Amino acid sequence: MARSGVRGFRADRLRELRIRAGLSADDLAARLGISRQAVSTWETGRSTPPANKLRHIAEELDVSISALMPIPESQLRLADLRALSSLTQVEAAGLLDISPTVLSDIERGAKKLSANEARAELMSGVYEMDLQVVRDAWTRTEKNRLRRARAL
């Protein structure tokens, strides 16, 4: 995965969808207001688009965001839900009325859901996801942190 933090982004899928939409890299770049080089780096996997660009890309290609980052629902973690909502960590933190640092801790699995059920409900609204999807993603996020900690 590239360093932008958008887990599951598929460079090959972006290229395929762009071509299917009948757009050149230059066309897509112009529609997005970015350079052709940015589109090229996304399509070659050298970088990934920022989360807040995903919605615009998906709209231009007439697809869902999940078509660009096809992660099965059973594997979604909290940061994935944010990305699927096309929000950066800073944007989401503002909407959740928490600091980006706290959101980072949550997305790394360092905060337990049991103490933050109200926060899960708020995330459900901000991310426009079913509350159970948020709860399940939170659980997977915590389990992933524990799995990484055991691997060290």
Image (spheres, rainbow, N blue to C red):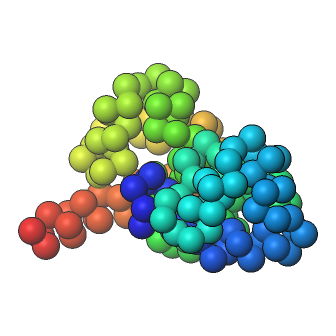
Q: In the image, is residue 12 above or below residue 138?
A: below
- Viewer-proximal residue among 46 and 112: 46
Q: Is residue 77 above or below residue 52?
A: below
Q: Residue furthest right?
A: 22
Q: Is residue 85 visible?
A: no
Nearest the camera: 68 or 80?
A: 68
Taking depth in this image into account, of 134 and 100 the one nearest to the observer is: 100
* Quarter in which the C terminus is drawn: bottom left
Q: Position of residue 112 (x, y in %)?
A: 28, 46
Instruction: Work out whether residue 70 or residue 5 is closer to the camera in this orientation and state it.
Output: 5
> Could you tell me which quadrant the N terminus lies in?
bottom left
| Residue 50 rendering spot, x and y as whole percentages | 55, 47
**Residue at (47%, 31%) from the top-left corner?**
90
Above-or-below relation of 145 to 130? below
User: In this orientation, does residue 126 appear?
Assistant: yes
- The residue under the point 14% across, 64% down is 149
- Kindly identify the residue that appears in the image at 62 percent across and 56 percent down: 37
- Left or right: where 72 falls relative to 59: left
Q: How many marks?
A: 0
**Left or right: 1 as drawn, with respect to 49:** left
- Name the residue at 82% across, 61% down: 61
Percent across and percent down for residue 93 are 46, 30
